[in-house]
Image (cartoon, helix red, strand yellow):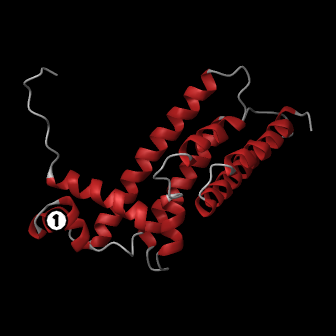
Amino acid sequence: MTQDAAPITPSARDRILETAQRLFYRHGIRAVGVDRIIADSEVAKMSFYRHFRSKKELVVTFLERRHRFWMDWFTRRVRELTENRTSPGLTVLADALEEWFSEPDFRGCAFINTVAELSEDSAEERRIAADHKRELRDFIRTLVPERPGLSADDMADRALLIIDGAIVRAQMTGSAKPAEDARALLALLDAKISGSS
């Protein structure tokens, strides 16, 4: 970019989404109203409703956007960490988790939080959360080598359970230490996969 080029100003829609992502993740979906999002994103009420017909539509868009952002980051980071190891195994997942847990704005998994927070009639939001976990599990499955007599699907399911537990513990304790515990449990899975347990 040349020095005299004008900075790109985010569109009203982008400002709304950035604000919603920050506020929903930090405070929860129920705690943040449309008026707060409008005020913090500095858009007119009419502009908000031109882009999003309802808060529910904004929540769905937020979740879809959060899913893509988080999965892109996590899969890229795991692959980068894998490149620097001679035999990475599943414990590499804990390394990426530890980095995430150490971020100052870490507030747990937006999808676990959403399912816990919203009511039974939030079917679309629950579907997005389930799809997020399914895609995460499918990614983990790619890290499990095929072995005779071993169900790679079962190993991926167990690894996902460890990850979800570590995320919740990290959120509850405000500490990155649950990543260490996850690493120890994932090491046990690695040993089982390699046949050394």
Instruction: Kindly tell me whether residue 151 is visible in this rendering.
Output: no
Q: Quadrant of residue 1?
A: top left
Q: Residue at x 45, y 52 (%)?
A: 105
Q: Quadrant of residue 47?
A: bottom left
Q: Residue at x 80, y 37 (%)?
A: 190
Amino acid of disc 1: Phe
Q: Is residue 71 left or right of residue 89?
A: left
Residue 173 lies, in percent from the top left, at 63, 61
Q: Mark 1 sits on what residue?
A: 48
Q: Is residue 46 left or right of residue 169?
A: left
Mark 1 surroundings within 10 Å by alpha-carbon count, few (fewer than 14), some (14 through 19), many (20 or more) = many
Give the answer, above or below, for where 187 lies relative to 46.
above
Q: Residue at x 33, y 72 (%)?
A: 32
Q: Quadrant of residue 139?
A: top right
Instruction: Kindly tell me whether residue 184 is visible in this rendering.
Output: yes
Residue 7 lies, in percent from the top left, at 13, 35
Residue 124 lies, in percent from the top left, at 42, 68
Give the answer, above or below, for where 64 lies relative to 150.
below
Residue 108 lies, in percent from the top left, at 54, 58
Quadrant in which the C terminus is drawn: top right
